[in-house]
Image: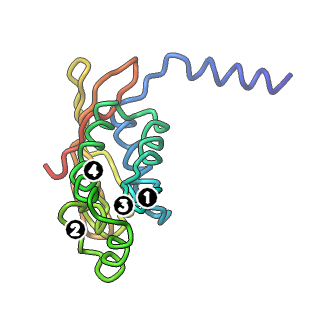
Amino acid sequence: MRLFILIGFLLVSSYGKTQSPADAALCFYEWYLHAIKSRDAGEHTAVVKKGANGETLLDYERYLHNLDSLGCIADTFKQSEIVRFQSCQDYFKDIPYVVYYDQVDNDAYTYDVPCPFFTQFYWIKDINYWAFVRVVESKIEGNNAEVQLELASGAARQNRRVFLKMIDQKWKIIKISQGL
């Protein structure tokens, strides 16, 4: 009986509460910082796989699934991520996996131009982990919002602008601008 009362209380107390734009912006970056520390690239970016016929494929389905599960990402953002990976995918379409594997094993920077996410964490533009993220400023104008975030690690700082839109009564990220 106490369990039902507790569940009822939690449902009633969370009903009608709307996540803020700052919460949505932090939702992505807190997840991203945690995901890159896991050292499982498929969690936070596209990864290269060997196709059934020995071709080189770029797989980002798990990454897109993870973005979906966050609940703070708009479909337009996911589409922009697919577009971001396209030049890398196009580059690999004529490269057999065995050639890719041999080259990347000798020099990870071989594919840095078409696939910059191979050599740095894209959303922090660095190869190092960042310790935390905080909200600097949040502005709301109607169904649109902009949140300025600061990434920090020791004395180093980076700023991001996160653009959001109210979609189905939730703030969702539509774009992230690196720098100010």
Confirm or deny contact between disc 2 and disc 4 (CB under 8 A): no
Please count the marks in the image.
Answer: 4
* Residue at the image position 31 percent from the left and 69 percent from the top: 127
Q: Earlier in the sequence, mark 2 or mark 3?
A: 3
Q: Quadrant of residue 55?
A: bottom left
Considering every residue shown, the one lying at the far bottom of the view is: 106
Helix, strand or loop at label 2? It is loop
Judge depth for marks 2 and 3 and give the one in front: 3
**Front tag of 1 and 2:** 1
Q: Secondary structure at mark 1?
A: loop
In the image, 89 versus 124, the foreground residue is 89
Q: Measure how far apart labels 2 and 4 are at the Cα level.
A: 13 Å
Q: Is residue 163 left or right of residue 32?
A: left
The vertical placement of 137 against 153, above or below, is: above
Mark closest to the chain's N terminus, 2 or 4: 4
Q: State the image coordinates of residue 41 (x, y, percent, origin top left).
A: 43, 61
Give the amino acid at mark 4. Answer: Phe
Task: Find disc 4 in the rendering and name its residue.
Answer: 85
Question: Which residue is the site of mark 1?
Answer: 53
